[in-house]
Amino acid sequence: MSPGFLRALASAVLYLHFVIVLFNIFWLVAVPLGAWQGWAFVRSFWWRAAHVASLAVVAVQTVAGALCFLTIWQSDLIRAAGGPAGDMSSIERLVSRAVFWPLPFWAFAVLYLAALAYAAALWWLVPPHKLSRR
């Protein structure tokens, strides 16, 4: 594969990573706000289950001492393309700064476990609608 294609794939992984971060933050804010405002969508079982599952994957990876698989894929693609991502576009640099914070690894474990605990508490405090059998 060409270096340009591999860099494009690395960029796609970065953008996907960013969308997942936004998804997780959105639901942490939307559920309590939506419960207060009476928004029915915040009780969607499938969106809420996807949110808790996503946070669980991130928390388990971090507690296990592993990097996020998306981070690994992006790094591998950049390396396969021929080196560091020094020629990132402005938006890629912005997205990268939003996703990759300069904190020690243990801080991420605490942060992700707290987010998972908060999402679990929200599941109990603002329960999703039960699935109906048809």
Image (cartoon, rainbow, N blue to C red):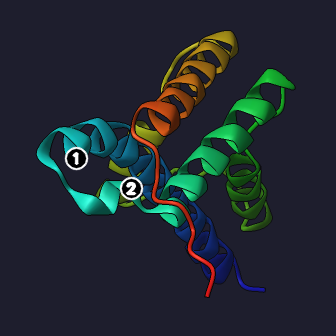
Whichever of labels 2 and 1 marks the residue nearer the N terminus, that label is: 1
In the picture, measured across the screen, residue 44 lies left or right of residue 85, that is left
Q: Is residue 30 visible?
A: yes
Question: Image quadrant for the C terminus?
Answer: bottom right
Q: Is residue 122 above or below residue 69?
A: above
Q: Residue at point 50% right, 39% down?
A: 123
Locate the N terminus by quadrant: bottom right
Q: Position of residue 110 (x, y in %)?
A: 61, 13
- The amino acid beneath tag 2 is Arg
Type of amino acid at the residue the image marks with label 1: Gly
Mark 1 nearby-residue class (10 Å; few <14, some 14–19, many ≥20): some
Any part of residue 100 in sight: no
Q: Which mark is residue 102?
A: none
Residue that mark 2 sits on: 43
- Would you name the residue on which mark 1 appears? 34
Residues 101 and 43: in front is: 43
Q: How many marks?
A: 2
Q: Position of residue 48 (x, y in %)?
A: 50, 54
Looking at the image, residue 53 sits to the left or right of residue 47; the answer is: right
Identify which residue is drawn at 54% across, 50% down.
Answer: 51
- Name which residue lies at 67% across and 19% down: 109
Q: Is residue 97 left or right of residue 112?
A: left
Say which residue appears at 54% left-offset and 65% top-offset: 46
